[in-house]
Image: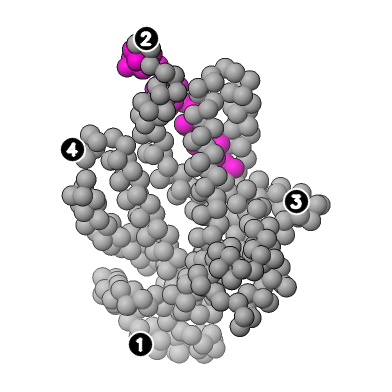
Amino acid sequence: MFSYIVRRILILPIILLGVTLLIFSMIMSLSPYERVSAYVKDPAQLKGGVAQLDALIEKHGLNDPWYQQYGRWLGNAVRGDFGWSESAGAPVTQAIRERFAATFEITLFALLPVILGGVLLGIFAAVHHNDPWDHISRILSIIGWSFPTFVFGLIVLMIFYGVLGWFPPGRLDNWALSIVNSPEFTNYTGLYVLDSILNLNFPVLLNALRHLVAPVFSISILWWAFLMRITRSSMLETLQKEYIRTARSKGLKERTLIYKHAVRNALIPVVTVSGQMVIGLMGGLVVVESIFDIRGMGKFLADAAQQLDYAGVLGGAIYFGFILIIINLIVDVSYALIDPRIRLE
C-alpha cells in the first residue's frame, strides 16, 4: 500500500506541470496588450498610450516565444509569484491567501452532509427497497438533481433572505465582522466557525453558522441527490450478487450481511464518482459565492474572468487544478483501500 501511495505522489508534479502548461497555452491566445496587465501594479501605466504599452511588453518579454514566457512564468510561480491581479488590486498569491479560507469553509461544510447523508440514505433506501421511505428518497433525489446550482441558489436567496430574512448573504454581519477584525479576536485560520470556537466567542460562531446555511444548502443539494442515487443503485446491485444470497441462505445475520459484506463492495463505484462529485461541487462555488456575495476563490475567479484579469484567471485556475489533483489522489488511495486488487495492479 505504501509503494502504491508513493507512486501516485511521484506522478503529481508531472500532472501539475501538464495542467500549468495547458492553462498557460490557453492564456497565450490573448494578445500581449491584454496580458501586460499581469505585470503592472499601477493601472495608470496602462493608459499611457501605445508607446508606453510597447515598452512594458518589451520589458516583460511578452513578444518572446511562448516556451520562453512559460519558463519565466513557471520560475516565478515556483517562488510563489503569480503576478499582479488587476481585479483584486493585489498580488495573486495574496488574493488567493485572503480568499482560501472562505472557500474551504463552505466546501468542508458542504462535503459532510453530501457524503454522510448521500451514502447513508442511499444504503438505507436500498436496504428498504420499495418501502415508503425508498419512494420518498427517490422523489427527493429526483427533485434535488433537477435543479441547477445557480437556480437553486437564487431560489434559496429569494425565499430565506428576501422574504423570511433568515439567512443573509456574505460571511458575517457587520457587527460580527467588526469583532473579528478587532485586536481582541485572534484569527488563527481564517475559518470563522473554527476561529470563533477557539476565541470562545459564541455570538460570532452562531452568526457565522447562520451565514453558512444558505450557500452550503444551495451547493450541496444537487450532489447529495446524485450521491444518494449512485449509492442506492450500487447497493441494490450488490445485494443481488451470488455471494450475498449464499451468505443469507447460510443464516448470516442480515445486519452483518449488509454492513460487513455488502456495503464495502457497494462503495467501490461510489468512491469512483466521488472525485467527479467534488469537482462539480467546486465548480458550483463560482456560482454560489457570486450569488451570496462571499469573498472566496470562486468569486475571485469569476471576477477575474469578467475583467480579463489574465494573472488572476491563471493563478485561480492553477489553485483549483492543484486542489483537484490532490482530491484525485485521495480518491485513488481510498479506492485501493476498499478494493485490494487495485494495489496489486
Specify whether 153 is left or right of 130.
right
C-alpha separation, residue under disc 4 versus residue under disc 1: 54 Å
Q: Circle 3: is it few (<14), some (14-19), or many (20+) Cα within 10 Å?
A: some
Q: Which residues are magenta?
A: 221-248
Q: Pointer 2 and pointer 3: residues touching (CB < 8 Å)?
A: no
C-alpha separation, residue under disc 4 versus residue under disc 3: 51 Å
C-alpha separation, residue under disc 2 versus residue under disc 3: 52 Å
Quadrant location of residue 167?
A: bottom right
Residue 222 drawn at (x, y percent): 57, 41
C-alpha separation, residue under disc 4 versus residue under disc 2: 32 Å
Does residue 26 belong to the magenta stretch?
Answer: no
Q: Is residue 158 above or below residue 322?
A: above
The mark found on residue 160 in the picture is: 3
C-alpha separation, residue under disc 2 versus residue under disc 1: 79 Å
Visible residue check, residue 336: yes
Among the two numbered marks 2 and 3 on one chain, the one whose residue lies closer to the N terminus:
3
Instruction: Say which of marks 2 and 1 sits in front.
Output: 2
Q: Quadrant of the N terminus?
A: top left
The mark found on residue 344 in the picture is: 4
Specify whether 279 is left or right of 9.
right
Residue 35 drawn at (x, y percent): 43, 75
Q: Circle 1: is it few (<14), some (14-19), or many (20+) Cα within 10 Å?
A: few
Check disc 3 and give the amino acid type: Phe
Check disc 1 and give the amino acid type: Lys
Specify whether 3 is left or right of 331.
left
Give the camera-side residue of 246 and 342.
246
Q: Is residue 42 above or below residue 289?
A: below
Q: Residue at x 28, y 35 (%)?
A: 339
* Magenta-drawn stretch, dominant element (helix, strand or loop): helix
Specify whether 33 is left or right of 141.
left
Residue 234 drawn at (x, y percent): 43, 27
* Helix, strand or loop status at disc 4: helix
